[in-house]
Image (cartoon, helix red, strand yellow):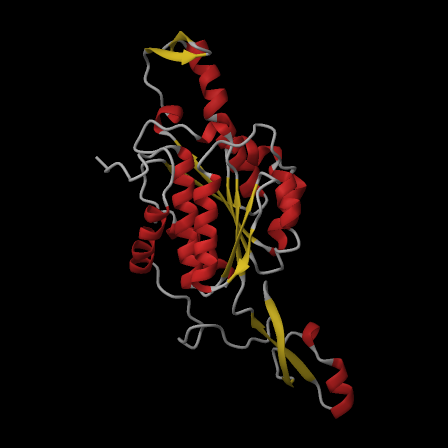
Amino acid sequence: MAAVPAGGGVVPTLDELLALRAEVLARVPARRGRSGMSGTSLSPLRGRGMDYAESREYAAGDDARHIDWRLTARTGRPHTKLFQAERERLTLLVVDNAPSLFFGTRVRFKSVQLARLGAAAAWSALRDGDRLAALSIDPLQAPAGPAGGMRGVLRVLDALVRWYATPGVDDASLDAVLERARPWLRPGSRAVVLATAERLLDVPPARWLALARHVEVHAVVAIDPFEQAPPHARLPFAAGGGRIDLDLGADGVRARWNARFQDPLAAARERLEAAGIHVHAVAVGAVATDWLAGFRAAQSEVA
């Protein structure tokens, strides 16, 4: 059985988020270019997050769309543009602290697990040389603006600890915070959305489609085993200062339970993956760095 963390699994602590650095560094290799050196090499192909670097004479097989017409006219010989990936792309964490996240039956609350998953992503981004930033779904919370190196990571970790210390409001809008994020998410950036399945579904499909065209997007949902696979038994629950008994073995009760806890996750996964979003559902008791395998695989697809 996993040990209970310093925060009792109820609130995230800065110490536990800092401790994840060693796990990430042990498991995640540094990003390397085709030459084997850290960083990226010049390419005649333009992809996400690619900036113009220089021009050279046109060679057979070069993409005609990238011909440098001004230099071609000036020299009388065809030239093509070369592009280079941004060495410091932005990884932005978008943080949802819905009241329903402050619950858990295994090791820790879902809110604490999301803080840990976000911290693992931040340490991985540092490994890649990315700048980091974080936005809360609560418009009254000041964002952690883009910064590189340890400064960027520490600002994001501090924000995760503060934002996941107390529940937010039910009517906060994930769509609104994604709109606020637009100026930061240049082509080639990466967004990690830590949210409930219900909040993911509240975002119009057109928003996800537009975002995924230029940004690598990961939607991360923390799941509790009890919600996803409750026992077939009659169980007591506290509600409104009283007590109710739910017979989770009854077909009607179980169907309503599934509609509340299982169906939104399945619907969110189907909708977002159809839009090109990477969806990660991670159990509250899982090792926080395990999800980085999917996180890193997505980077390889884009590279």
Pick the front one: 156 or 199: 156
Q: Quadrant of residue 188?
A: bottom right
Pick the front one: 17 or 175: 17
Quarter of the image for the N terminus: give it: top left
Q: Position of residue 241 (x, y in %)?
A: 43, 10
Q: Position of residue 152 (x, y in %)?
A: 48, 59
Vertical arrangement, residue 23 with respect to residue 137, above or below = below
Total marks placed: 0
Q: Is residue 5 visible?
A: yes
**Residue at image point 59% right, 68% down:** 50
Identity of the residue furthest to the left in this view: 1
Vertical arrangement, residue 74 with respect to residue 244, above or below = below
Q: Position of residue 129 (x, y in %)?
A: 46, 66
**Residue at image point 56% right, 29% down:** 169
**Residue at image point 35% right, 63% down:** 29
Pick the front one: 9 or 128: 9
Q: Position of residue 101 (x, y in %)?
A: 45, 31
Apparent side of residue 285 relative to residue 36 in the rendered image (left or right)? left
**Residue at image point 62% right, 84% down:** 59
Identity of the residue furthest to the bottom in this view: 75
Apparent side of residue 171 relative to residue 220 in the rendered image (left or right)? right
Vertical arrangement, residue 122 with respect to residue 50, above or below = above
Q: Is residue 248 visible?
A: no
